[in-house]
Amino acid sequence: MLLYDVVLQSRLMIGSALYPSPAIMAQAIAASNASVVTVSLRREMAGATKEKPRFWSILENLHQPLLPNTAGCHSAKEAVTTAHMAREVFKTDWIKLEVIGEDDTLQPNVFELVEAARILNNDGFKVFPYTTEDLVAADRLLSVGCRVLMPWGSPIGSARGLNNVYGLTTLRAHYPDVPIIIDAGLGVPSHAAQAMELGCDGVLLNTAIAKAIDPIMMAEAFSKSVEAGRLAFLAGALQPRNMATPSTPMAGKPILD
Amino acid sequence: MMVTINGSQARTDATTLFELIEERGYAAMFVATALNGKFITIGERENERLRAGDAVEILTPRQGG
């Protein structure tokens, strides 16, 4: 997978939040074979330290590209400021741009999102916009310089899978050459496989792995489902039909009645 | 003087953002700072003077989805 001229070996991107422990997080990320790990910036509530933060050391040991996010931002201004702070700390110009517009569904505010993306692209960022399947929003994001689209499957953490298969299929068809990463709402590996079978380029997961009873095993399951879905897309799937067609040849069937 | 640091009132003798980071014991390279909602780079902290009532955000790397 090629994102902003970087070749990634895996089509799975994984979040670093909500795991039972840092050790399980690291093991789950390793088991997922993910190509990118998402991170955030937050106030330090545990007290200041002159030492390198422990979480930073864990990230270094992962040896994976990091994708900082702007999670929780509700305006373009807030997201742009957060992105600049993240670029300085994480030393990457990649930013997963989230601008939330509705608190119950965490639905992106695509108006503020486009404005933030415009500013950040002009500031030299590589923007990964968390958006909806809306075609007009996608068009605006691409026109302001985004080269990746990250539509939600369903609300963040909801585990509902792909709520609007038609919309995502249409988005894929409209932009066949733009990487599309399903960013949110996947709950089980079959959801990820479905996204890949639709022709999406990758998926980004967090809660479904981190909150599983066994996050490490679930990470491996998602890894395999993403690979299986991609292979199925490339292989060309049989299209559904209403009537049965026998798989065993009728030619040569004896008459025994 | 009194300033707000990460949402909490605090008394400080620091005159610049650079001094505040030192005073509070943060590792300068591993935090990002904003003053009254404006991003202040590491290089700008030394010249960024603090005033009573300023709101300072000091952020560190954390888990994220």
Image: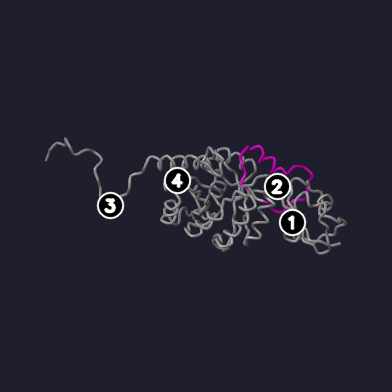
Where residue A26 is drawn, which disc sits there?
none
Quote the CA–CA distance across marks 3 and 1. 60 Å
Image side of residue A93 versus residue A214, left or right: right
- Find residue A93 and report its horizontal and vertical position in percent: 64, 47
Write down the residue under mark 4. A196
The disc numbered 4 marks a residue on which chain?
A: A
**Which stretch did the figure color magenta?**
A41-67
Vertical placement of A209 versus B36: above or below? above
The disc numbered 1 marks a residue on which chain?
A: B
Q: Is residue A57 magenta?
A: yes
Looking at the rendered image, the disc whose residue lies closer to the viewer, 4 or 1, is 1
What residue sits 67% from the left and 48% below the top? A87
Write down the residue under mark 2. A89
Question: Looking at the picture, which amino acid does disc 2 mark?
Answer: Val
Q: Are marks 1 and 2 on the same chain?
A: no
Write down the residue under mark 3. A242
- For mark 2, does the 10 Å Cα neighbourhood hold few (<14), some (14 to 19), or many (20 or more) residues? many
What residue sits 81% from the left and 61% below the top? B3
Looking at the rendered image, the disc whose residue lies closer to the viewer, 2 or 4, is 2
Disc nearer the start of the sequence (4/3): 4
- Find residue A116 and report its horizontal and vertical position in percent: 61, 58
